Amino acid sequence: MLSARRLSLARQSRQLFSDVSFSLEPGRALLLQGRNGAGKTSMLRILAGLSQADDGQVLWQDSPIQQSENFHASLLYLGHQPAVNVELSPTENLRYLCALHDDNAESIANILVAVGLAGYEDVPAGQLSAGQQRRIALSRLWLSKAPLWILDEPLTALDVKAVAGLEKRFKQHLDAGGMLIVTTHQPAVLPEHATTRLELSCPEPESEASA
Ligand SMILES: Nc1ncnc2c1ncn2[C@@H]1O[C@H](COP(=O)(O)OP(=O)(O)OP(=O)(O)O)[C@@H](O)[C@H]1O
C-alpha cells in the first residue's frame, strides 16, 4: 500500500497543494486531475521519490519511501517525455529495457505486437512518429512486474487503438492486485469502480485567471 500523508508543496511563491493525504490499496487506481500547471507532475515526482515535498511524507508499506528497502524495485515510473533511445530500434530499446527488468515475462516480439509496433521492429526510433515512440516507452508496462505504476500523461500522442490497448493493460494490472497512479485528460481508460479521483485545484495566478 502507498500512503501520502499531509503533502504540501509551493512553487514560485504559489501554494500548489497543501495537506493532501490518501492511501492506495492493491487493485486500486488514483486519477490525479487538475488544469495545466496545477501541480500534477510535481505531485507524481514526489510520490515516486524523485523530489521532496515541503511538508508531509510518502509511505510504502508503512515505511517512508526514502527508507524503504523495496520501494524502488516495486515502482515503475513513466514521466511526461517518452524515455526512448532514438538511435535504437524498438527491438533494441526493449532489449535494453529487458536488461533493466530481469523479471520480463513476455518475449520482445510479442510485446512489440501487443503495443502495435509490428512491422517497425528494426526502424530507428528517431524515424518513428511521436505516438510510435510513446508506444516503445509504454512497452515497459508489459515488461515490468512492479506492483506500483506512476504514469504522467501516458496517453499523449496515442491513437484510439493504442489507447484501447492501454486500457486493457491497466485493467489486467489492477485485476492482478497492482496499483496505478496516473494523470490523464482521458479518464475513461480507468475502470470507474476501482478508481479514486484527486483534484488539484490551486487558484490560478491573476494574470492567467483574467486571460
Ligand atoms: N522545478 C521547478 N522549479 C520551479 N517551478 C516549478 C518546477 N517544476 C514545476 N514548477 C512550477 O510548478 C507549477 C506546477 O507544475 P507541474 O508541472 O507540476 O503542473 P502540471 O499540473 O503537471 O501541469 P501540466 O498539466 O501542464 O502538465 C507550474 O507553475 C510550474 O511552473
Image (spheres, rainbow, N blue to C red):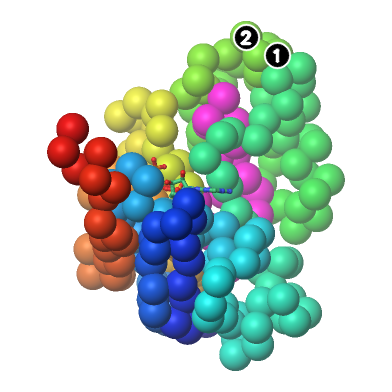
Q: Residue furthest right?
A: 99
Viewport quadrant of the C terminus? top left
Q: Quadrant of residue 65?
A: bottom right
**Depth check, front residue: 81 or 121:** 81
Rounded to the nearest whole Å, what is the CA distance between mark 1 and mark 2? 6 Å
Q: Which residue is mark 1?
A: 124
Examine the rendering and report whether any part of residue 4 can be seen: no
Whether the residues at callouts 1 and 2 have beta carbons within 8 Å, the answer is yes
Look at the numbered disc 2 and say if its residue's Cβ is closer than 8 Å to ligand 1: no
Could you tell me the amino acid type at mark 1? Pro
Crowdedness near tag 2: few (<14), some (14–19) or many (≥20) residues, C-alpha within 10 Å = some
Disc 2 residue type (three-letter): Gln
Would you say 30 lies left or right of 67 here?
left
Residue 128 image point, x, y percent: 57, 13
Q: Position of residue 78 (x, y in %)?
A: 57, 47
Residue closest to the eye, 105 or 196: 196
- Is 76 located above or below residue 133 in the figure? below
Q: Is residue 33 magenta?
A: no
Location of residue 199 (image quadrant): bottom left
Asked if residue 207 can be seen in this view, the reply is yes
Q: Which residues are magenta?
A: 133-151
